[in-house]
Amino acid sequence: MSKSLSQVFLPAFGGTALLLAAAVFLANRQHAENKLEMLQARVETLDSARADARRMAAAEAGRAEELAQKVAEIEAAMADRAKVGGSLSRPAPAQDGPLGLGRSALAEEIHAWDVDILPDGRGLPEGRGDVFTGEEVFAEACASCHGDFAEGVDNWPVLAGGFDTLADKDPVKTVGSYWPYLSTVWDYVHRSMPFGDAQSLSNDDVYAIVAYILYSNDLVDDEFELSHENFAEVRMHNADGFVVDDRPSTEYPHWTGEPCMANCKETVAITKRATFLNVTPESGGDAMSAPETAPETTTGTTTSTTTVSPAEPAAAPAPTAEVAPEVAPEAVAVAVAEAPVDAELVKAGEKVFRKCKACHTVGTGAKNKTGPQLNALLGRQIGAVEGFRYSKVFQAAREEGRVWDEASLIAFLAKPKSYLKGTKMAFSGLKKKGDQEAIIAYLNSFRGE
Amino acid sequence: MADLFKPSRRAFLRGSAAAAAGTVAGSAVAQAPDPLITELQDWATLTGVGVDETPYGLPIRFESDVVRRNVEWLTASPISSINFTPIHALDGTITPQGCAFERHHSGAIELRKEDYRLMINGLVDRPLVFTYEDLERFPRENHVYFCECAANSGMEWAGAQLNGVQFTHGMIHNMEYTGVPLRSLLAEAGLEAAGDLTDKWVYVEGADASSNGRSIPMEKALDDVLVAFKANGEALRMEHGYPVRLVVPGWEGNMWVKWLRRIEVSDMAVESREETSKYTDVLEDGTARKWTWVMDAKSVITSPSPQSPIRHGPGPLVISGLAWSGHGRITRVDVSQDGGITWQTARLGKQGDTKALTRFYLDAEWNGEDLLLQSRAIDETGYVQPTKTQLRDARGENSVYHNNCIQTWYVNGKGIAENVEVS
């Protein structure tokens, strides 16, 4: 209050002094006593005005105190209400017993909708299915997204493998490596799959598919049959891999309390920059695409307190795997600039080659299967492997003397049926540049075979 | 009354200083009269469109850039995917439904109110079926809550990756919901059959093909969960679960089941796909946290940001952003302009509502030098939003979800902003 009161008075005092000084000056010069009297009268008036102002200010001070008290009351009430569960909304009145709304659910209705399966197996219908049947059903209903071997196509989820990767920066979370309960697999396949045709599978087919997924993850052997009877006997690899949310004890105590406000660290340097990755959609808004505002390359800029040093080019973008459930790290490879051919790439190519293995072999002793063997493929004449019955388009390519090089192989792998129209190869193609490069690196590692 | 003296006095002093320097306070001198003022404009002489023109309006075409956006490489198909709220272009706290982010597991479905049924079954005294009309006859409430996908900022764990706040923080929206408390519906079905409620669960499930389902502990179900049918005063949009969705205040968006069709009281968590294989958090040693439902306190500066650079020169600059906490109200937000060396407490647009977005402002003076902008939220429990380093030290980098770390924007002398990470 004192501060605002002084603001009331200061102008009044200042004005008075000024007028007094002016009055004395005028009086000395003109020797006009009457004028001085007039001015003295004016001063008296001002004095009285000052007294009035003081009284008013005192009244205002009282009023301000009242208001401050009211504000405090309102804030306390708001805080109370916030504690009770929020905002300034009033809760719905408590009910004394049912309102009599709705109707009884019939047993048939509950049966139709209540199909979830609990971890202990409650809710499972009777039925059975073996690995062999499962492989067939899987190929028909699931493989177009998840791959023949549950390895995942494009960005669709990988269902098998990934063991011992959970402590890696990009864990591969599959049914085998991650899922703690078998009930979840059965429940999800039965209730939500296949994508675009949910709840179309018979119970026995679901048992068979789940048996096949277990087999793909080395959880059962190829003779295995899954049924409602032996369901509880299956133990998942990662059953003990979970802890209940412990943030309240492991994190919150460390991140509570008055934070630092000044001199919180000595220097600051930029360590990573999103623009180096260039994976942001271009339609991100006018500011991002307008050339006149495009970020310029900064090679070291200083501010008074901050050292902004050029960033290390960040590593490959973080795979976001489950922003949405269906994201594969490979997705990112597309956006990253051409990678050098290296052991990592060959390794990646080996993984991609799983899509080809059903029909092709490569390496020592490779033989023709549904497709020709692929040793020393780059530089090899198209359609020239001994003993393999090629399609007409391949035979024609051979007669033209065409040779597999990187460009032709990439074009073929990208869209097999467009590049060599009439090819018998059923594979739909490798759309990702990263996959194409990886598989070429992998095949090229057998150039000496 | 007393307060009235302050701004006027300050304004007077500022005005006289400017006059002394020979300039007019607050603006440059115009070189020539502005034709927008001196010439008669079409809109000032001709008539505009009539009231029949737009029975339901969209934003004016000049704002056509303010839309949800997708990051295509993120997912296999836009039908099972997510898009992002253009938070760089919004102000205040309420998110218009038309640009509020969407997340579907099997696409957004059209479900008529007439075809809508909600079942309550399991450990209840009277398994019931409600129609949409039934729901509208229960006493209802209004609340503003944020809904944040657990994966918001998930792409940023390993490093600064996406150059725009829409993409780094746009899996969030904030609406005023109208609905019936879940506890009213549970009371209608009766919970005597459930016995001791402390270890009971409520499983909720959607009507779409994914039948997304989540288990919610009974304590939360009886607390503030809403069965909502209106958002921001109007019917829910299709993409937000028309005609009925669940609202689970402060908890991860995946639990806010859309097209809600079934509520089952049970004696254990279902451990559905969405609460085991997804929405669990792998820690550094490979073990994973489950049931991490609460969204911890978080904030971000929405402007300046990569999509909202500083277009004016040096001088007054409004730094603005959003803060929120799944634990309650935001009580304070601090802003740093030097990458975390010094902090200033920002001004809250209005007092924070519990589990709702809070707008903050720092009214700054930009001298044209580089900025490293950060914001730091503090909620009513005293929790302080952690740095990226703190979060990584606690959890490693294997996680996807629950990244609530402090974000840094580097703003250069031209006002261009960029997503960066700092030491």
Image (cartoon, coloured by chain):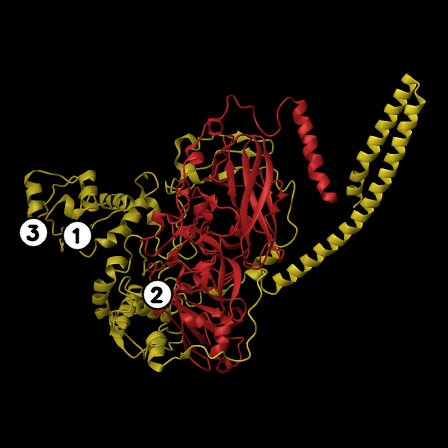
Chain colours: A yellow, B red
Question: In this figure, which residue is indicated by the disc labeled 3?
Answer: A389
Amino acid type at mark 2: Arg
Of badges 2 and 1, nearer the viewer stands 2
Amino acid at dot 3: Arg
Q: Nearer the viewer, mark 2 or mark 3?
A: 2
Q: Residue at x 52, y 65 (%)?
A: B141
Task: Confirm or deny contact between disc 1 and disc 3 (CB under 8 A).
Answer: no
The three-letter code of the residue at mark 1 reads Ala
Q: Is residue B320 left or right of residue B61?
A: right
Mark 3 crowdedness (10 Å alpha carbons): few <14, some 14-19, many ≥20 = some
Instruction: Estimate the x, y position of residue A384 in percent, counting from the top left.
Output: 9, 45
Q: Is residue B140 above or below residue B104?
A: below
Which residue occupies the foreground of this view, A40 or A256? A40
Front residue (pair B63, A106): B63
Q: CA distance from mark 1 to mark 3?
A: 16 Å
Q: Please tell me whether mark 2 sits on a helix, a strand or a loop.
A: loop
* The furthest residue to the top: A29
Q: Residue at x 38, y 42 (%)?
A: A279
Left or right, residue B241 beside residue A352: right
| Nearer-the-camera pick, A138 or A9 | A9
- The residue at which mark 1 appears reads as A366
The image quadrant where one finds the C terminus of chain B is: top right
Q: Residues within 10 Å of mark 2 (few under 14, many from 20)?
A: few
Secondary structure under the numbered disc 1 in the rendered image: loop
Residue B337 placement: quadrant: top right
Earlier along the polypeptide chain: callout 1 or callout 3? 1
Reading the image, the residue beneath label 2 is B112
Q: Quadrant of the N terminus of chain B?
A: top right
Task: Judge from the rendering whether residue A121 lies leftward or rightward of residue B310; answer left or right.
Answer: left
Q: Position of residue A20 (x, y in %)?
A: 88, 27
The location of residue A81, given as percent across then percent down, is: 62, 63
Residue A75 % position (x, y): 67, 57
